[in-house]
Amino acid sequence: MIKDWFYDKLKADIGIKRFEHSLRVMETSIKLANRYNFSVEKAAIAGLLHDCGKLKGETNLLKVSSDFGIILDSMTKCNSELIHSILGAAIAEKEYGIKDQEILRAIRYHTTGRENMSLLEKIVYIADLIEPGRSFEGVDKLRRLALEDLDKCLLYSLDNTLKFLIEKKKLIHIDSIKARNYLLIQTRTTE
Ligand SMILES: [Fe+2]
Ligand SMILES: [Fe+2]
């Protein structure tokens, strides 16, 4: 259950802009949960806390991660975007007292995705991208797809993300490739 102090702590930890983004991701997660008959409460918690590892200011995320006993792979160490989701799952568990593994995994994988994602993982991943504050090319298509077919939406967004990462000569985490391949095989076999 979301406790009142979650909001205060989150705002203090991640700053007002990210906090407001988190509220919008929570609202969008709730909408998707309603659309796909999933627990609104779980979706709300996961959406609200998905970025709780994006600690503001000059916080050294590597140092905080090691304080939490998190062992990061070499690729994740080079990429703070990836660290915040792994750290977020640890903070959600230890500081917010979230025990539900499904919620923790949704936070853990909201940046990369992974093979065979749960419905909640898909909801948070997509809500993060399509919340009303987002504006990028193709976001309207994603918003439409999210309500029509969550897997197609996820596949479309993974394809776009991978293309973007290649164009920008950025590292691609293996979990994103696995997420895409899994969905591609799954959608082909069900068509
Ligand atoms: Fe994030
Ligand atoms: Fe986010």
Image (cartoon, rainbow, N blue to C red):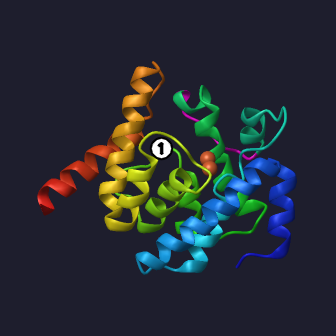
- The residue under label 1 is which amino acid type? Thr
Place residue 69 in its image quadrant. Answer: top right
> Where residue 76 sits in the image (x, y, percent)?
56, 33
Front residue (pair 63, 184): 184
Q: How many marks?
A: 1
Up/down of 95 relative to 157, above or below = below
Q: Is residue 140 visible?
A: yes
> Where residue 52 sits in the image (x, y, percent)?
72, 53
Provide the secondary structure element on which disc 1 rests.
loop
Place residue 174 in its image quadrant. Answer: top left
Up/down of 166 relative to 35, above or below = above
Work out which quarter of the rendered image holds the N terminus and state it: bottom right
Q: Which residue is mark 1?
A: 112
- Left or right: 153 as drawn, with respect to 31: left
Front residue (pair 85, 161): 161
> Where residue 163 sits in the image (x, y, percent)?
36, 30
Please give the name of the residue rendered at 42% of the width and 29% of the height, measured from the top-left corner: 164
Point out the residue furthest to the top here: 169
Q: Is residue 179 visible?
A: no
> Where residue 131 sits in the image (x, y, percent)?
57, 57
Please give the name of the residue rendered at 73% of the width and 49% of the height, measured from the top-left corner: 18
Which portion, as a residue range, is magenta?
68-74
Front residue (pair 135, 174): 135
10 Å crowding of disc 1: few (<14), some (14-19), many (20+)? many
Work out which quarter of the rendered image holds the C terminus and state it: bottom left
Residue 31 is inside the magenta segment: no
